[in-house]
Image: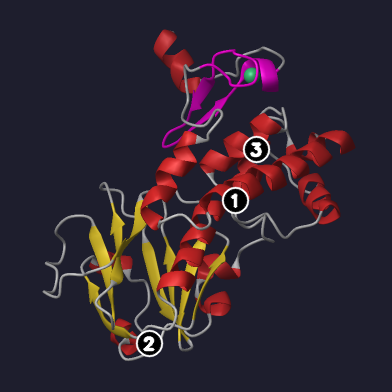
Amino acid sequence: MPELPEVEALAAFLRENAVGKVVTRVDLAGIQTLKTFDPPLSSLAGLEVTGASRTGKFLDLDVSGIHLVVHLARAGWLHWRAELPTAPPKPGKGPLAVRVHLDDGAGFDLTEQGTRKGLAVYVVRSPSSEVPGIARLGPDALAVDAEAFASLMRGRKGQLKGALTDQTLVSGIGNAYSDEILHVAKLSPFKGADKLTDDETLRLYDAVRTTLTDALERQVGQQAAKLKGEKRANLRVHARTGLPCPVCGDTVREVSFADTSLQYCPTCQTGGKPLADRRMSKLLR
Ligand SMILES: [Zn+2]
């Protein structure tokens, strides 16, 4: 799932490549992707792209005051294409959901792999009031200061993993970077957010900043097509179950949930003790 660094890099890429061009047509191939009806998708045609930005994990393309807002969800992606086919796509076939044509023949596809459809596109005049997911966002993970971050954690009941990925608490961090941040901070994903010492809170705050800033530095300026590989190549624990921890060499472990999983290093994060994995213990019983 694209998180703060990837979405920021996509916004930077669009500022570089799409701003100043005029939208000539927008094709909708995945009907369920479009979550709004007024203004219609067709209202973007003939208007100039005037900006591209990120809010939380949402990508916002400003087309002369009408915003095309995209939430890529788990398996969505933006593919920039120097030359788009002009024939209209067949609806409901393959991963293509939305295709945006620009006046120089270039443009981009919004696609989604797999069957669980989560990719969402909104055409609105005011993203902050008309896109429910944006209206609910907590402060940006890279904008919140140490004091505000500490107070958010103090007021939060429940585990750190859930706190970091809750977009209404702090926005921009998802499943991958929360694993990375907790590993950098040497904290257990199951530790209570409101149980952190002052020192641990500061460590966590620093880890949020360094992890996201490092990823941003690697990704901004990259071609859209290279971002996913760049992200994967630099992960320490996320999606690395069974591989050695790059810090201590211990084996990276996993805890599975119904539709997701987390990865961590026992030596670095949980005093050497593996965390209970309900699914695994059920299998072993
Ligand atoms: Zn380790």
Q: CA distance from mark 1 to mark 2?
A: 36 Å
Q: Residues within 10 Å of mark 3 (few under 14, many from 20)?
A: many
Q: Are marks 1 and 2 in contact (CB under 8 Å)?
A: no
* Amino acid at dot 2: Pro
- The one of 94 and 231 positioned closer to us in this rendering: 231
* Mark 2, secondary structure of its residue: loop
Inspect the magenta stretch and tell me whether residue 250 lies in it.
yes
The quarter of the picture where residue 194 lies is: top right
What residue appears at the point 61 percent right and 21 percent down from the top-left corner?
265
Q: Which residue is mark 2?
A: 39
* Mark 1, secondary structure of its residue: helix
Q: CA distance from mark 1 to mark 3?
A: 16 Å
Q: Which residue is mark 3?
A: 181
- The one of 227 and 98 positioned closer to us in this rendering: 227
What residue appears at the point 37 percent right and 90 percent down from the top-left corner?
47
Q: Residues within 10 Å of mark 2 (few under 14, many from 20)?
A: some
Using the image, determine if residue 171 lies above or below residue 13.
above
* Amino acid at dot 3: Ile
Residue at the outermost right position: 198
Residue 245's disc is none
Using the image, determine if residue 282 lies above or below residue 48.
above
> Is residue 244 rendered to the left or right of residue 280?
right
**Residue 9: horizontal and vertical position, in percent?**
51, 58
Sequence-first disc among 1 and 3: 3
Q: Which residue is mark 1?
A: 217
What residue appears at the point 63 percent right and 45 percent down from the top-left corner?
214
Disc 1 under 8 Å from ligand 1? The reply is: no
Q: Residues within 10 Å of mark 1 (few under 14, many from 20)?
A: few
**Which mark's residue is nearer the viewer, 1 or 3?**
1
> Which contiguous range is marked in magenta?
244-270
